[in-house]
Image (cartoon, rainbow, N blue to C red):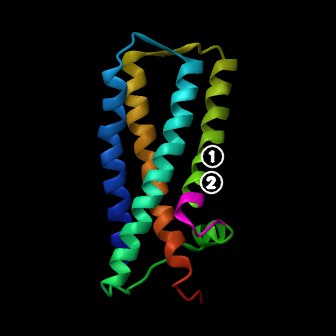
Amino acid sequence: MGRAYVWRAAIVAAAVNLVLNPAVVIIGEVRFVPLVAMMVYVDLATVAVCVAVSLLGAHRLRRELSRGHHTLHAGAAWERRLLEGTPANPWAFGALLGLGLTFLASVVLTTLGILGLSGFVYATFVPFVAFYSAAVAFVAMRWTLVRGLLERTPVG
């Protein structure tokens, strides 16, 4: 379970969300998405994706470790320092990560509102949701696996 495993799992999580999240948006087709509605959707989706991906990633990590795959890699040094103080529980880690990313997304969307953007037309909202949710899923899966490996990897 080396570096390639962590990257592969993160890419798969991103690819699933690249398709799944826009599908949810496409079902409720609207011509224009106001900035406030977009902020609510992005905030809820971010927390949900982070918690779900963290739970799935933690389960996958436990399964791989129980199979005896012990070639561990706990990410780059900056990732280890960043994640050392975070909760080891996947529910708590996913919620914390989701809330942090929600804060960042809210700051960006509020800044866009201050700059005069009132919303997104449907054709730009769907690709935004696709790539944003894919990026969130990638970060959540990668950091869940890195966080799970921190306790099992000697730092040296």
Residue annotated with mark 1: 99
Q: Amino acid at mark 2?
A: Leu
Q: Is residue 134 magenta?
A: no
Circle 1 — which element? helix
For residue 6, say whether it is visible: yes
Image spot of residue 138 (x, y percent): 43, 53
- Per the image, the residue denoted by label 2 is 96
Horizontal arrangement in the rendering, residue 148 relative to residue 70 (left or right): right
* Residue extending furthest toward the top: 31
Q: Which quadrant would the C terminus be assigned to in this image?
A: bottom right
The location of residue 153, given as percent across then percent down, is 52, 85
Residue 25, compared with residue 91, is above or below; it is above
- Work out whether 105 lies above or below 77: above
Q: For the N terminus, give its image quadrant.
A: bottom left
User: Can residue 75 be seen from the camera position used here?
Assistant: no
Question: Percent position (x, y) of residue 136?
Answer: 48, 47
The three-letter amino acid code for the residue at tag 1 is: Leu
In the image, the segment drawn in magenta is 86-92
Residue appearing at x 63%, y 23% in the figure: 112
Q: Is residue 109 left or right of residue 61?
A: right
How far is mark 2 from mark 1, CA to CA?
A: 5 Å
